[in-house]
Image: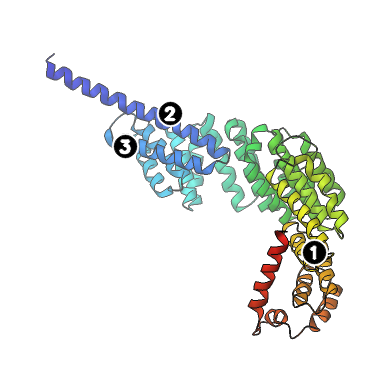
Amino acid sequence: MSRLGAAAWGVVILSGCAYYNTLYNAQRLYDEAEVMRRTGRDSLAAARYQDVIRKTSSAYRSRPSSNDSPETLLLLGKAQLRVGRAREAEAALARAATVADDDLRPEILVYQAAASARLGDREAATRLLEEAFEEGLSGPPLGEAFLLRGHLGLAAATPPEGWEDLQLAGAADPAIAVEAGVERLRLGVRHRDLDRARTALATLMSVREAGERFDTISALVRAAAEQWSPSVAATMLGDVESTAWDAAARGRMQLEQARLFHEAGDTASAEAAAWAVARSRGESMAPARILLAKWRLDRTRDLGEAQSVLSILLPAGDDPGVADMVAAVDALEEYSGIGLDQPLGLFAAAEVARDRLEAPILARGLFLAYADSDPDDPWAPKALLAALDVSQDAEDRSWLMGRVEAHADSPYVQAARGRSAAGFEALEEELRERLSEIATR
C-alpha cells in the first residue's frame, strides 16, 4: 500500500475512533443526567442533556450514513425529550426509525410515543406504545413504556390498568421505581383517590432512594393536605421515624408531618413529632427547635414565657437561625428593661416581639403597655394601630378601634385612613432616631 493510501486509512480509522468515543461519552452523560433527574437535581440534569444533544448532533452530522446512526439519533431524541424539545425529538426519532434494525425499533417506538404525548397527540402515543409492546420490549425501555402508558391512562380517567402499569414500570426497571411511585402519588392526589395516594406514599417511604426526592414528595403531601385536610395528610405519612430514608430526609419529613398536625389543630401530636427531631443530633435538629420555639412564642403572653424558649433553642445555639432568635429574645428583655424608665423602650420591645419573634399576643401587650404609659405621647396612636394590626380577636379589635378613635387628629390615624397627614414624616424620623439611641445603649 502506498504512503498516501496508508495515510488515508489512518484518517478513516481515527475518524471512526473519534465517532465512537463521542457516542460513548454522550451515553455516559445521558446516564448521569438520568440519575440527576430522578433525584430531583433538575438544573444539573438539564445541563447534561444539553451536552448529550451537542455531542450526538455533532456525531450524526459527521457520519450520517453510519450503521450506528440509529443509536445516535435515538440518544439525541431522548435527550431532546428530556429538555422539552418534543418537536425536534420527534424528527430525530422518525429518522432513527427508518434505518433501525428490529432489535432497536421497539425502543424507538416508546420514545416516539413519548414525543407524541408531549405534543398532545394521545391517540398517536397510545398507538405507538401498543406497537412497541407487540414488537417486544424488555429492560429499561419496558419500564418507560409502562410508565408512559400508565400516565396516559390516568391522565384522562382512572382505569385499574393505569395503576397497574405504574406498578409494573418499577418492576420492569428498578431505576424508575421511585419515578413511578411519585407519579402514582401525584395522580392519586389529582384523582382524589385517597387509598391509592396513601399506598403510593407508603411505598415511596419504604424505598431509601425516594428520600432524594424529598422536595417533590413533600410538595405532593402538601397538595394532599389541600385536597383533603392537613390532618389526613399528616396521617398519610404514618410512622415517619420508621421510613427507609436517610436521617436527613427522614428528619425533614417528620417536621413536615409536625407542621401538618399543627395546622390541623392537633398540637400534642405536632409537638411530639417536632420534639422527636429536636432531640436528635441530625441536621434537622436546629429547624425543629426553631419551629417549637415559634409555636410557643405564637401563644406567649408575657416576658417570662418568652424567656422560656431559650431552653428550647440553646442546645442548637451554633445554628445561625437559632442564634438570631436567641439574640432577639435578649433584645426583647433589654428593651423591656429600658421601658421601665423610658417608655419608648416598650415600643422597641414590641417591635422585636412582632417582627423578629413573631409573637403577636406579646407584641400587642407591649404596644398597649407603651400607649398606656404615656397616652399623650405622639407615638401612642402608632402603638395602638400596631396593636390593632396584630390582634386576631374580633371583640378585641372593636375595643382597640374605639381607642384609636380617641386620637382621630393624629397624623398616624389620618395616614391609616388614607388622608393627608401633616407632620407624619417628621414624627417617623424622630421615632427612628430615638429607637436607634435605645438600640445602641
Classify mark 2: residues with Cα within 10 Å, few (<14), some (14-19) or many (20+).
Answer: few
Mark closer to the chain start, 2 or 1:
2
Q: Kindly state the secondary structure of the residue where label 2 is placed.
A: loop
Compared across the picture, whether 341 is left or right of 79 comes to: right
* Residue at image mark 2: 103
What x and y, as percent, mark residue 87? 40, 49
Disc 1 marks a residue whose amino acid type is Ala
What x and y, as percent, mark residue 54? 36, 39
Disc 2 marks a residue whose amino acid type is Asp
Disc 3 marks a residue whose amino acid type is Ser
* Residue at image mark 1: 363
> Which residue is drawn at the image coordinates 12% and 19% (left, top)?
4
Image position of 306 with respect to 93: above or below: below
> Which residue is drawn at the image coordinates 26% and 23% (left, top)?
14
> Which residue is drawn at the image coordinates 66% and 79% (left, top)?
424
Tell me the quadrant of the picture where the C terminus can be found: bottom right
Q: Considering depth in this image, is 295 or 52 the residue closer to the camera? A: 295
How far separated are the C-alphas under marks 3 and 2?
25 Å
Compared across the picture, whether 66 is left or right of 34 comes to: left
How far separated are the C-alphas under marks 2 and 1?
72 Å
Residue 418 image-quadrant placement:
bottom right
Image position of 218 with respect to 354: above or below: above
